[in-house]
Image (tube, grey):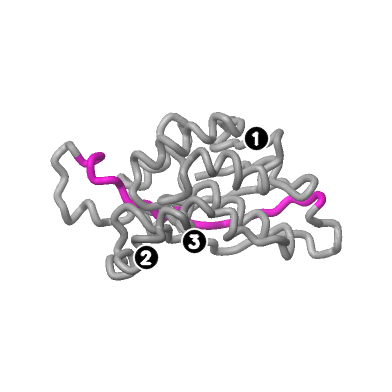
Amino acid sequence: MSSSTPSTSTSALHHAVSRGQEHHSSHSQEPHHHQHHGKPASKRSSSSSTTKTTDRTDLLPTQFRDPIHLAETAITSLFTVPGPPIEHLQKEVLPRLYHEAYEHRVNCREHGMKEMIELIARFRDKFSSVKIKFRSHLMDRDGTATLHAAAVGLVYEIHVRLARDSHSHGSSSSHETEPIRAPVISVVKIFEGKIAQVDMVV
């Protein structure tokens, strides 16, 4: 899994995520601003893009099929770049997905939701695009794992593209377009139908 990632790029992403000072990653639900590879699509939706980005709660399911569905939705909603405005994310999206006592641990460094929001804001400054590709999951199938209480294991890859201004140290334009990838293993704990804790190894 780790062999698919150039070591220098991965270590840079690993450093950013694990220190909690730079940024955090996750996937993209293809919102409508910034430079995206799909330029024709952005032309068509440019007039309505602001409204749709603001109404991201409409994209959340009214019900979750199972703990895995909840865990994947929560992770992608938090870490998507581009994503909804931070204020909207904080007030409208996250309260529906994350428990008020949420804790996030990345490589044993702990963050509460307040720190996570600050970290996500910095993350968006550094990366123009962040996507998550889920590879596999693990959950008890004996009926003990429910939306009220469960632990779910997830394996996924973070795919990011650096923002242009983060290449001020003279790297080539061809290198700018290369995505950075890093494998991630997460254990997501669910309580009362919301995400209570995520332990993440990048």
Which residue is labeled 2 in the image? Answer: 45
Answer with mark 1 or mark 2, whichever residue precedes in sequence: 2
- Labelled pair 1, 2 in contact (Cβ < 8 Å): no
Q: Which amino acid is tagged 1?
A: Glu
Q: Above or below — where is 123 with respect to 187?
A: above
Residue 69 appears in which quarter of the rendering? bottom right
- What's the residue at 32%, 56% (across, down)? 179
Question: Disc 1 to disc 2, how far (Cα)?
Answer: 36 Å
- Labelled pair 3, 1 in contact (Cβ < 8 Å): no
Question: Disc 3 to disc 1, how far (Cα)?
Answer: 23 Å
Query: Marks 1 and 2: which is nearer the front?
Result: 2
Answer with mark 3 or mark 2, whichever residue precedes in sequence: 2
In screen coordinates, is 196 left or right of 118?
A: right
Answer with mark 3 or mark 1, whichever residue precedes in sequence: 1
Which residue is labeled 3 in the image? Answer: 133
In screen coordinates, is 161 left or right of 200?
A: left
- What's the residue at 57%, 60% (across, down)? 59
Q: Which amino acid is tagged 3?
A: Lys
Measuring from the top left, give residue 98's x and y in whole percent: 67, 43
Q: How many marks?
A: 3
Secondary structure at numbered mark 2: loop
